Image: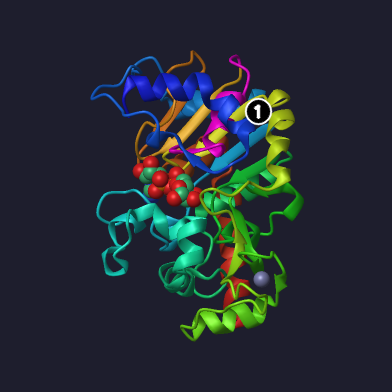
């Protein structure tokens, strides 16, 4: 990401976050080749970060993206080669993100429906240690709220209460008509997707039925605006597994007060991380970083206990 884009994000992030419509800043601002922000200014010492989180973090806001679900086997969007946007050739889309664009979906829902068949939540993917780390923050009484861009539903499978989660880009928990908005029966919708059909509404437009996820060009759910109060009263922000390419969600990272420590756990440096005094970074494989952080916090056993209990229940349910 270039400095121009980085500065744009740092300054207009919160404003874009208040806009409420799913947008990609990238389409407005062409990145320049180098970065303004430097790694060396940031705290990358996991022991110091753990100490800060344990001492100062009692109102923690967490924000996540597709990177937290790649360890569960769900590809993210933009990692070169493995990301979803690099693997859509068969749909001959005008541009990769068209698969999640509401006007394109209304014309040709097949590309999205084929993707939805593969990744319909609750079918074949399960939460990983990164998801259980967020549950652990909740169990330790530190989590204010999780804001996620993900629609795979894995975070609530950990037992995290729904009121602690804002699915900023919607979820598959319900379905409706893309034109008249009429609710559709979720089970019927799911069955038709699994049978490679393109379910349509009975309304005059015969419009395609879609899960209540947020397509590009649509508004985020009203609950998303809780981020303004949550960040204002937060004392620690954790951002995991996101490229921070998509607004208004990405603006959460810039909405926390400047004195609040921000921890990025991600393979790469993204967004405006590295531009603030209190920024901390754990760069690398997400699950490895989470394990190291929990070890430094003295929570490693608790983390694995949560995962083992889930696996045991899953086994018993089979
Ligand atoms: N460990 C560490 N980082 C990882 C891992 C991993 N195992 N897997 C992926 N990542 C990082 C990638 O390097 C990248 O920085 O997670 C980030 C994922 O970024 P994206 O693929 O852009 O996903 P996301 O940020 O969630 O996309 C945002 O774009 O297409 C829209 O609506 C869609 O919600 C999505 C939004
Ligand atoms: Zn309709």
Quadrant including the N terminus: top left
Instruction: Name the residue located 35 percent from the left edge and 20 percent from the top edge.
Output: 4
* Residue 34, x across and y down, in percent: 25, 22
Foreground of the two, 288 or 221: 221
Secondary element at tag 1: loop
Task: Please state the extent of the stretch shown in magenta in the rendering.
Answer: 244-259
The residue to which callout 1 is attached is 57
* Residue 37, x across and y down, in percent: 36, 18
Q: Is residue 91 above or below residue 133?
A: below
Q: In this view, does 148 lie above or below 306?
A: above
- Drawn side of residue 259 relative to residue 221, left or right: left
Instruction: Name the residue located 55 percent from the left edge and 24 percent from the top edge.
Output: 254
User: Can residue 202 be seen in the rendering of this structure?
Assistant: yes
Q: Is residue 84 magenta?
A: no
Residue pushed farthest front?
204
Instruction: Name the residue located 35 percent from the left edge and 58 percent from the top edge.
Output: 84
């Amino acid at each position: 990401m270039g400095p121009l884009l980085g500065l744009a994000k740092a300054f207009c992030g919160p404003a874009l976050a208040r806009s409420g419509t799913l947008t990609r800043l990238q389409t407005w601002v062409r990145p320049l080749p180098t970065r303004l922000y430097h790694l060396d200014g940031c705290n990358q010492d996991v022991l110091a970060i753990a100490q800060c989180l344990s001492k100062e973090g009692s109102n923690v806001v967490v924000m996540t993206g597709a990177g937290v679900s790649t360890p569960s086997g769900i590809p993210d969007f933009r990692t070169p080669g493995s990301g979803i946007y690099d693997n859509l050739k068969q749909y001959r889309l005008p541009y990769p993100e068209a698969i999640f664009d509401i006007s394109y979906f209304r014309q040709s829902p097949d590309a999205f429906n084929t993707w939805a068949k593969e990744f319909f939540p609750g079918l074949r993917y399960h939460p990983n240690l990164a998801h259980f780390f967020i549950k652990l923050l909740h169990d330790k009484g530190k989590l204010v709220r999780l804001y996620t861009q993900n629609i795979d539903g894995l975070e609530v499978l950990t037992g995290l209460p729904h009121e602690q989660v804002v699915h900023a880009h919607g979820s598959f928990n319900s379905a409706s008509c893309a034109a008249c908005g009429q609710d559709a029966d979720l089970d019927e919708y799911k069955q038709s997707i699994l049978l490679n059909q393109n379910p349509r509404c009975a309304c005059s437009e015969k419009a395609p039925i879609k899960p209540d996820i947020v397509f590009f060009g649509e508004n985020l759910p009203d609950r998303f605006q809780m981020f303004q109060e949550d960040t204002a009263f937060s004392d620690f922000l954790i951002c995991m597994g996101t490229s921070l390419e998509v607004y208004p969600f990405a603006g959460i990272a810039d909405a926390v007060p400047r004195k609040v420590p921000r921890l990025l756990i991600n393979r790469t440096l993204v967004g405006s991380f590295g531009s603030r005094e209190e920024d901390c970074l754990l760069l690398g494989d997400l699950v490895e970083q989470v394990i190291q952080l929990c070890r430094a916090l003295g929570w490693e056993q608790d983390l694995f206990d949560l995962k083992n209990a889930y696996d045991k229940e899953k086994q018993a349910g089979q």
